[in-house]
Amino acid sequence: MNQQQEDFFERLKEELDKSTESWPLDYLYKFIVPNDENKIQQIESAFAGSDAKFTTKQSGKGNFISVSIRVMMPDADSIIDKYKQVSSVEGIISL
């Protein structure tokens, strides 16, 4: 992981800790990935065993898929761990 990513995750943790009054938190992840079923499965597997609810939507030209995931997360570190876990999916964009 490069320094820019580390800085982003550090800022995200600070913001989550500052803005969240109580945990666990119903958190919404949003990603965009190339339209490839394997990439979507990689994302889904990162949330396996949780109560995650997935919503997908294909882009207008069909080149990309937006993936929204709503899941109860116990703390800021767990949220960041999931971002790090899915960052290995080639072509993923975290929103």
Image (cartoon, grey):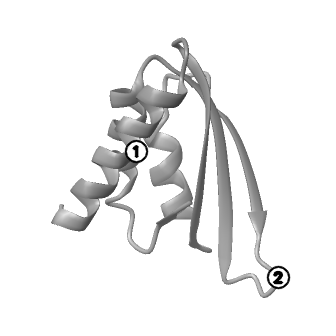
Residue shown at the point (31%, 60%) measured from the top left: 88
Q: Is residue 16 above or below residue 91?
A: above
* Nearer mark to the viewer, of 2 and 1: 1
Residue shown at the point (53%, 29%) measured from the top left: 19
Packing grade of label 1 (10 A; few <14, some 14-19, many >=20) is: some
Comparing 11 with 86, the one in front is 11
* Location of residue 31 (image quadrant): bottom right
| 51 horizontally vs 75: left or right | right
* Location of residue 36 (image quadrant): bottom right
Q: Residue 70: where, in percent of width, then height?
A: 66, 35
| 79 horizontally vs 31: left or right | left
Residue that badge 1 annotates: 12
Q: Is residue 7 above or below residue 77?
A: below
Residue shown at the point (25%, 56%) measured from the top left: 7
Packing grade of label 2 (10 A; few <14, some 14-19, many >=20) is: few
Residue shown at the point (52%, 52%) measured from the top left: 41
**Disc on res. 60:** 2
Q: Earlier in the sequence, mark 2 or mark 1?
A: 1
SS state under label 1:
helix
